[in-house]
Amino acid sequence: MQLMSSALVAVALSAVVAFMLQSRPSSIELSAAAMPSLNEFHETAGVNQLPIQEVEDQSLIYPAGTKQ
């Protein structure tokens, strides 16, 4: 009897989780649809008008340590 009731609880819990995953709030979908693309962000910010900046290689080379 206990095995059957725990199996019933597991099935009910699985059904609830499946239902919650399928029904997403429409506010999330609307906010995602309202966001502009990255290209629009770059155009708005004027990224293409910034000067090209040269960055020197700042990586460090560590010598192989000697084992003592």
Image (spheres, rainbow, N blue to C red):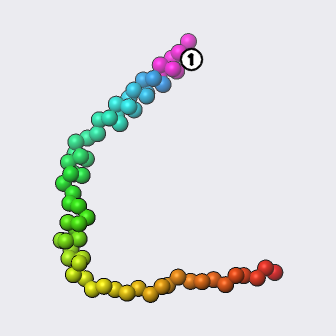
Nearer the observer, 27 or 67: 67
Instruction: Depth check: give the residue in front, 67 or 10.
Output: 67
Q: Does 7 lie within the magenta span?
A: yes
Q: Check residue 19 for magenta coloring.
A: no
Name above or below for residue 18 compared with residue 28: above
Q: Is residue 17 left or right of residue 28?
A: right
In this rendering, would 42 be left or right of 22?
left
Q: Is residue 64 left or right of residue 4?
A: right
Residue at figure coordinates x 18%, y 71% from the top left: 44
Q: Position of residue 3 (x, y in %)?
A: 56, 17
Give the labeled residue for mark 1. 3
Magenta residue span: 1-9
x and y percentages locating residue 20 in the rendered image: 34, 34
In-front residue for pair 44/6? 44
Image: 1 above or below 32: above
Q: Name the residue located 29 percent from the left edge and 35 percent from the top edge.
A: 23
Q: Amino acid at mark 1?
A: Leu
The secondary structure making up most of the magenta span is helix
Residue 35 x %, y %? 21, 57
Q: Is residue 50 above or below residue 16?
A: below
Residue at (22% x, 42% y) in the render: 26
Residue 55: quarter of image: bottom left
